[in-house]
Image: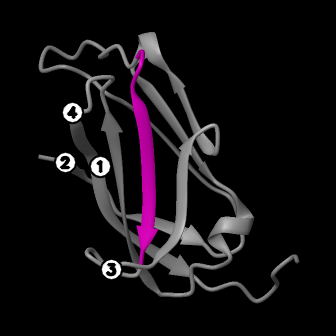
Amino acid sequence: MAGIKNWKVDQAANFRFSIVYKDPDGDPIDLTQYQVYMDIKSAPGSKKILASCAIGDGIVVTPLLGKIDVNVNADKTKVIAYPKSAYDLIIVTGSGVVTRLLEGWLDVSRAVTIND
């Protein structure tokens, strides 16, 4: 079962967070050969992706520490116009096993100034 975390996000500004994936004993899980993805949508089940991140595009993984750093840049957050948007963060093992690590809602504060 995924962890649940809701965030406050400023539209048209970078949104960052980090998590460490741990086993039941509290030890970091080695993320070597894992892929990590995050999508933001208006609601769970929506077909339209508002923003997306992956390793090399907003996500950095420190495999041996089990650490995942997410940075949704300002260009991606500026298109999130819904006051509440859903997200989830998934990992995929080298053998294709998918685990949803985190999910929740983004409470979006609409921007007045958007730097184009």
Q: CA distance from mark 2 to mark 4?
A: 14 Å
Q: Residue visible at 63% across and 79% down?
A: 79
Assign a secondary structure to mark 2.
loop
For badge 4, the amino acid type reads: Val
The mark that comes first in sequence, 3 or 2, is: 2
- Residue tagged by mark 4? 97
- Residue tagged by mark 2? 2
Residue 102 numbered mark, or none: 1
Span of residues in magenta: 32-41
Most frequent secondary structure within the magenta stretch: strand
Q: Position of residue 110 (x, y in %)?
A: 62, 86
Assign a secondary structure to mark 1.
strand
The mark that comes first in sequence, 3 or 1, is: 3
Q: CA distance from mark 4 to mark 1?
A: 16 Å
The mark that comes first in sequence, 1 or 2, is: 2
Assign a secondary structure to mark 4.
loop
